[in-house]
Image: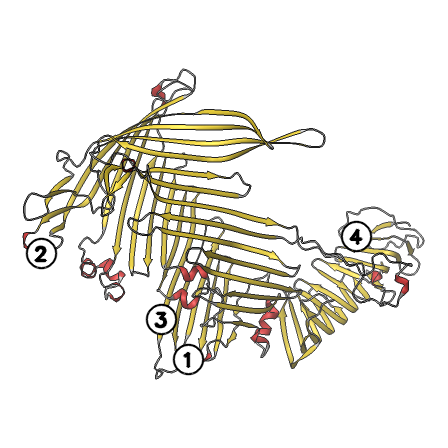
């Protein structure tokens, strides 16, 4: 076998050249319009009759206009024309194939001019970016236009034409749009009973364009809403930076839903969207006894912008009425949400990291109790850590070289709206926000807005000792508070019958306060090592890190500081209590009671090595942490007059088992309680019952599983199911594999994650509070190469019931997608079924046709399908 490769430049013939003179053969040509051709069997060049070339055996002709391959190619160099024919209809190996950029044409006969890029094709199959075209005769008049006679268009592969559009005439323009005339739709070779006199299908969505959205009919809940039309609207493409969409659902009862979505983006600058939703649900007739009308609204604004590499702004506004998600969304998380949160934040970082500044605000709505809280604007300013005496790093560094200074200030504001009448309050949040008198009317509180400013300065010394084994550090913190108001309490003798005769009033005027605390901390680390062997585990190391700290804070409730005052509590005049004049302020104030507390904590970790040996005797070692952290802490306050010991806090975390994250924690109290459940200054151990009382306990474990390869592997059985048992030529003479069919191994990609959490909390004279929930999320696997199953499910072991769950099943049918989703548990039960084409363009045609438009069904009472938002 010989392979010949030639390249001929497209130049004008020289009249002085000999007819029999051969053109030079070269491997490559630098001429732009050079024609390269090759064959594996033979190559015949005839320069007498018009400069023709005949290529036999895996022939290929390449030009900038395209590439032609076939079993045999005839090339007319003088006419810039190539022709290829299949030897027979059954000889698919010799079929001519013409490839041009993204499209491919396969035909029994191809006649193509590579200079004018015109051609004729017989029994051609053309692959366009989003489908296939088949025609008895195809004519390519230029590079952008193709005419087809007796054409077929489908997004299904030619071997699996589950549906297709058959037309007498077709025209393809710019490889994007397919126009047809006198066409008919076929599904499983069954003709649809309507003939389309003309139409078109856009075969590519690479170019964005404006236009009408594809509406669909709605048949759900006809008894309460009537017939409906969904997704009726318009999409507007303004430019590459801004698009808009307006859609609506309309029902004959008067129920409608409107949604507007505006999106904008400029790379490396800003991006965001604005979404406005409005719905009105009502019954069929106003005279019906159960007639209702409900209006729901929603406003969502998202904006992200980078002003520079050092400053950014982020906004997420989410305002809605209480039942908006309930009536317009079937997502489990949406329906479980009882709050709405909006955030706005700006951050700035100095280019040299000298300081940071941020300002933010947050609005939280709670629909359960009709409360709204506006937090902010809040601002934070902090300076970079200053080391005024820092010297060169050396072993002889002094303690003062480790002195650090820090400064930080915070401004906070808050508006809390909790009306006394709850849902029936006539004063809205907006009215109360801008009118202090209406706020007091609705809440009974005259403190409209709360403001506060706090600045903190700290001094620290990290290493007071030069020892490499012991670390001693000291710190001092100073706080200052500024407020526009303060609190005064007084005893009202005229209200002795009042269960709370002590009244509170707000005193307006600038007030400030200061506090400080001092701290000393000592820590070290030591190790315990064992050479014990247990199976493949060799050697154990125990790391212990104890920490002992002392903290001092004066009693700022003393009268000398002026931050606390006394108030009479009854008519005897003998009982008083102290209160802070900053008790109602947003940032609090100096604390009451002297504190001289010693805190002791200890952290432990356990490690080992997994040692294995291969067949050659080579040793492989891998470190394994059995316990990442096992810690306990407690404190003792010398200055307290009682209950000096704090609770004992313990925690555990481990990743010893690959992929499993285990965490646990528990709190213990050392004191007895009285008949009302309050702790008294008497240890439990003195009662002889136990050392400590478990207050709360929690444990959680999570694991993510993943397996399988690229997907289920297809295999060919030794015998196909359709074989002739009388055909003895298949047996020679005894077939040991007769009636044997191998079982395909399970090689499907799958994944899921499990999370178990258990919580226990002690309650005096009552049964403890418990919760135990197992959640399985992101479960997904392929049943077959075409079937995929996914779900999320959970079980509450205390309530003994399933948590809200979702199940989904998807089937790929070559050019169809079958989707089924269901939530059979909980309050938000629904199902959703949809059969759609892979091609969105043709699917839009199906949705407009009777019978075919009804391939999507759901049990949603609104008829708006699943996960609208």
Q: Label 4, on which residue?
A: 34
Q: Relative to 244, is 196 on the left or the right?
A: right
Q: CA distance from mark 4 to mark 1?
A: 70 Å
Q: Label 3, on which residue?
A: 295
Assign a secondary structure to mark 4. loop
Q: Label 1, on which residue?
A: 253
**Percent x, y for residue 9?**
81, 52
**Position of 862 relative to 337 (above/below):** below
- Name which residue lies at 72% across and 30% down: 616
Q: Nearer the viewer, mark 4 or mark 2?
A: 2
Q: Label 2, on which residue?
A: 497
Q: CA distance from mark 1 to mark 3?
A: 14 Å
Mark toward the start of the polypeptide (4 vs 2)? 4
Assign a secondary structure to mark 2. loop
Q: Residue at the far bottom: name it.
A: 287
Mark toward the start of the polypeptide (4 vs 1)? 4
Q: Nearer the viewer, mark 3 or mark 2?
A: 2
Mark toward the start of the polypeptide (3 vs 4)? 4
Mark toward the start of the polypeptide (3 vs 2)? 3
Assign a secondary structure to mark 3. strand
Judge by depth and name the residue closer to the eye, 238 or 555.
555
Assign a secondary structure to mark 1. loop
């Amino acid at each position: 076998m010989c392979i010949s490769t030639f390249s001929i430049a497209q130049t004008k013939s020289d009249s002085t050249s000999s007819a029999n003179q051969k053109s030079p053969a070269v491997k490559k040509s630098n001429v732009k319009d050079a024609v390269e051709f090759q064959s594996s069997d033979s190559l015949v060049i005839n320069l007498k009759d018009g400069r023709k070339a005949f290529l036999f055996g895996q022939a290929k002709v390449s030009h900038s206009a395209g590439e032609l391959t076939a079993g045999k190619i005839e090339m007319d160099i003088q006419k810039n024309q190539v022709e290829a024919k299949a030897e027979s209809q059954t000889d698919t190996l010799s079929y001519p194939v013409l490839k041009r950029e993204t499209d491919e044409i396969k035909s029994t006969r191809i006649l193509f001019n590579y200079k004018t890029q015109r051609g004729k094709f017989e029994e051609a199959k053309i692959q366009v970016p989003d489908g296939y075209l088949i025609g008895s005769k195809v004519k390519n008049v230029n590079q952008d236009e193709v005419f087809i006679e007796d054409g077929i268009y489908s997004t299904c592969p030619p071997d699996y034409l589950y549906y297709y559009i058959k037309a007498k005439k077709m025209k393809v323009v710019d490889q994007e749009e397919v126009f047809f005339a006198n066409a008919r739709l076929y599904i499983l070779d069954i003709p649809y009973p309507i003939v389309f006199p003309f139409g078109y299908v856009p075969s590519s969505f690479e170019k964005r364009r404006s236009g009408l959205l594809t509406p669909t009919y709605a048949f759900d809940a006809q008894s309460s809403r009537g017939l409906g039309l969904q997704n009726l609207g318009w999409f507007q493409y303004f430019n590459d930076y801004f698009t808009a969409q307006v859609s609506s659902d309309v029902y004959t009862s008067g129920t409608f839903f409107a949604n507007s979505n505006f999106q904008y983006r400029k790379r490396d600058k800003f991006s965001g969207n604005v979404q406005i939703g409005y719905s009105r649900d009502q019954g069929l007739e106003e005279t019906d006894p159960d007639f209702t009308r409900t209006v729901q609204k929603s406003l969502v604004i998202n904006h992200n912008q980078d002003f520079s590499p050092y400053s950014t702004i982020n906004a997420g506004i989410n305002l809605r009425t209480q039942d908006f998600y309930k009536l317009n969304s079937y997502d489990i998380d949406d329906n479980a949400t009882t709050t709405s949160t909006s955030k706005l934040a700006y951050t700035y970082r100095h280019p040299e990291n000298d300081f940071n500044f941020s300002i933010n605000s947050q609005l939280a709505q709670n629909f359960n109790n009709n409360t709204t809280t506006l937090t902010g604007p809040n601002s934070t300013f902090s300076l970079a850590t200053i080391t005024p005496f820092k010297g060169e790093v050396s072993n002889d560094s002094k303690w003062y070289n480790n002195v650090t200074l820090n400064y930080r200030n915070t401004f906070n504001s808050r508006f809390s709206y909790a009306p006394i009448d709850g849902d029936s309050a006539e004063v809205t949040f907006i009215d109360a926000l801008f009118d202090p008198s209406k706020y007091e009317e609705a809440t009974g509180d005259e403190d409209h807005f709360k403001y506060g400013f706090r600045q903190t300065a700290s001094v620290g010394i990290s290493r007071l000792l030069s020892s490499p084994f012991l670390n001693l550090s000291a710190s001092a913190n100073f706080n200052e508070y500024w407020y526009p108001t303060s609190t005064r309490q007084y005893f009202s003798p005229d209200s002795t019958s009042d269960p709370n005769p002590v009244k509170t009033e707000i005193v307006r005027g600038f007030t400030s306060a200061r506090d400080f605390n001092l701290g000393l901390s000592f820590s070290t680390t030591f190790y315990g090592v064992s050479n014990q062997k247990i199976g493949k585990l060799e050697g154990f190391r125990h790391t212990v890190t104890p920490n002992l700290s002392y903290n001092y804070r004066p009693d700022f409730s003393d009268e000398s500081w002026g931050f606390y005052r006394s108030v009479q509590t009854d008519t005897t005049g003998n009982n008083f209590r102290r209160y802070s004049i900053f008790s109602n302020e947003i940032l609090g104030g100096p604390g009451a009671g002297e504190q001289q507390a010693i805190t002791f904590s200890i952290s432990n970790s356990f490690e080992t090595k997994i040692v294995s040996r291969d067949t050659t005797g080579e040793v492989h070692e891998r470190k394994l942490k059995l316990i990442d952290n096992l810690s306990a802490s407690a404190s003792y306050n010398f200055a307290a007059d009682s209950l000096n010991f704090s609770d004992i806090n313990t925690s555990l975390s481990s990743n010893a088992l690959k992929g499993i994250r285990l965490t646990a924690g528990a709190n213990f109290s050392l004191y007895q309680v009285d008949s009302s459940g309050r702790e008294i200054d008497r240890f439990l151990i003195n009662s002889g019952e136990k050392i400590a009382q478990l207050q709360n306990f929690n444990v959680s474990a999570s694991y993510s599983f993943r397996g399988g390869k690229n997907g289920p592997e297809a295999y060919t059985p030794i015998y196909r199911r359709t074989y002739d048992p009388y055909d003895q030529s298949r047996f020679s003479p005894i077939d040991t594999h007769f009636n044997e069919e191998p079982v395909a191994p399970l090689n499907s990609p799958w994944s899921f994650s499990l999370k178990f959490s258990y919580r226990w909390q002690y309650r005096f004279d009552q049964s403890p509070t418990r919760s135990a929930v197992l959640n399985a999320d992101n479960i997904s696997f392929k049943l077959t190469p075409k079937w995929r199953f996914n779900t999320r499910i959970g079980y509450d072991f205390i309530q003994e019931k399933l948590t809200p769950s979702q199940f989904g099943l998807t089937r790929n049918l070559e050019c169809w997608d079958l989707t089924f989703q269901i939530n059979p548990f909980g309050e938000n039960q629904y199902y959703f079924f949809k059969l759609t084409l892979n091609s969105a363009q043709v699917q839009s045609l199906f949705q407009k046709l009777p019978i075919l438009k009804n391939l999507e069904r759901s049990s949603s009472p609104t008829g708006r399908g699943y996960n609208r938002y």
